[in-house]
Amino acid sequence: MALIDWDEKYDIPHPLINEQHLHLVSLINRLFEQMRAQQGKGELEALFSELVVYARTHFQQEEAVMKGLEFPGLAVHIKEHREFIAKVLDWRKRIEEKTASIDIEVLQFLKKWLTGHILDLDQQYAALLPKVPG
């Protein structure tokens, strides 16, 4: 059972960005499965750290695409990305300090943020991307 089921409504007409979104969904689903299977804290923490690193890489790539499109909403998008990274870095710090854990609250936040972000802000710049015949 996945926490996030990929749906074509999440598609962005940019193969690399779409692939990265799929990978982020996969990381969140793996975190969910490991939490449900009661994996060791070290494994969960390593996967959470991988998610943080990958999200940063994805955001840099996505921002470069938007800059190339001269997307007028770039500043808002960058702000959203920075706020997300700050939130997950705070969680990671609290997890490392043992004052928080990776639980359903964290996973629901990740799910809601990613799916909402793709369906709202990402679709705004996606409308400017050239349509690939297919």
Image (spheres, rainbow, N blue to C red):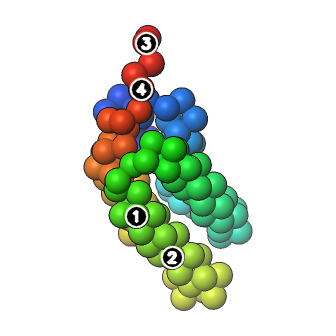
Residue that numbered label 1 is attached to: 75
Q: Mark 3 sits on what residue? A: 133
Disc 4/disc 1 C-alpha distance (Å)? 22 Å
Let me know if residue 39 appears in the view: no
Q: Distance between the residues labelled 2 and 1?
A: 16 Å
Circles 3 and 1: CB atoms closer than 8 Å = no
Q: Nearer the viewer, mark 3 or mark 1?
A: 1
Task: Judge the density around disc 2: few (<14), some (14-19), many (≥20) Cα neighbours within 10 Å.
Answer: few
The quadrant of the rendering that contains the C terminus is top left
Q: Which residue is drawn at 31% across and 45% down?
A: 124
The residue tagged 4 is 130
- Circle 4/circle 2 CB separation < 8 Å: no
Query: Marks 1 and 4: in contact by CB < 8 Å?
Result: no
First in residue order: circle 4 vs circle 2: 2
Seen in the image, is 22 located left or right of residue 113?
right
The residue under the point 43% across, 12% down is: 133
- Asked whether 39 or 32 is in front, the reply is 32
Question: What amino acid does circle 2 point to?
Answer: Ala
Q: Mark 2 points at which residue?
A: 86
Q: Which residue does the image show at 47% across and 75% down from the upper left?
A: 87
Q: Give the mark nearer the N terminus: 3 vs 2.
A: 2
Nearest to the observer: residue 25 or residue 20:
20
Vertical order, 59 against 9 (above or below): below
Element assignment for label 2: helix
Gap between marks 4 and 3, in whole Å?
A: 9 Å
Residue 41 in the image, given as x and y percentages of width and height? 65, 70
Mark before the other along the chain sequence, 3 or 1: 1
